[in-house]
Amino acid sequence: MTAETWRPYWPRIIPYVLAAVVVAGMVVLAVAMPSNWALGDRIGLVVIGLMVAGVLHMLARSRVTADDRGLIVVNGLRTHEYEWAEVLGVSMGEGAPWPTLDLADGSTLPAMGIQASDGDRARRAVAELATLVHERGEAGGS
């Protein structure tokens, strides 16, 4: 099996566009400030813009990757790796923003790399992931 990766579409595009706008806006603001603003103040504005862009990147980097060994789920700051036997199921309830993985230790994990706002694309991704979990996970007897 080749690795399959699911990423949200609009929830990934929008933060990157916003990050570019924020950084560009802060650069323009730093240049346009009155002459009594020191260089450090101007650099501070740009640094704030870059920090906002960093936070937006963390939101946009969410993904779910399935390969022969298992699942890698990237949600914001954290990356979770699970073998197939550790994943019991996947579900996305009505109105849920993303699917939830049911894990063998009794816990659940949001899979933010698939987002309901993507509509049919998200439904297909959840169905594909559920099929893989059933075939390769504990429920499939592997």
Image (cartoon, helix red, strand yellow):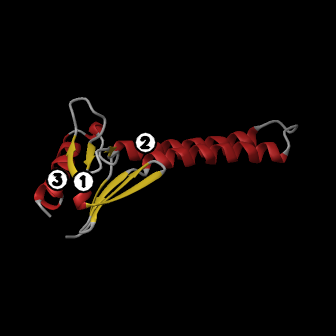
First-in-chain label (1 vs 2): 2
Which quadrant would the C terminus be assigned to in this image? bottom left
Q: Residue at x 35, y 43 (%)?
A: 10
Q: Which residue has dot 2 on it?
A: 14
Which one is closest to the eye, mark 3 or mark 2?
A: 3
Circle on res. 2: none
| Left or right: residue 55 compared with residue 111 | right
Secondary element at image label 1? strand
For mark 3, give the secondary structure: helix
Q: Where is residue 31, by image quadrant?
A: top right
- The kind of residue on which mark 2 rests is Ile
**Which residue corresponds to the image point at 78% horizontal and 37% vertical from the top-left?**
33
Provide the secondary structure element on which disc 2 rests.
helix
Where does the image place residue 3, in percent across and percent down from the top left? Answer: 26, 66
In the rendered image, residue 128, in percent from the top left (x then y), is placed at: 16, 53
In the rendered image, residue 12, in percent from the top left (x then y), is placed at 40, 47
Where is the N terminus found, in terms of image quarters? bottom left
Quickly name the residue at label 1: 87
Residues packed near mark 1 inside 10 Å, few (<14), some (14 to 19) or many (20 plus):
many
The answer to which of marks 1 and 3 sits earlier in the sequence is: 1
Residue at x 62%, y 46% (from the top left corner): 51
Question: Is there CB contact under 8 Å for labels 1 and 2?
Answer: no
Spatial separation of the CA atoms under disc 3 and disc 2: 25 Å
Residue placed under numbered mark 3 in the picture = 128
Q: Amino acid at mark 3?
A: Glu
Relative image position of residue 5 (x, y in whole percent):
29, 59
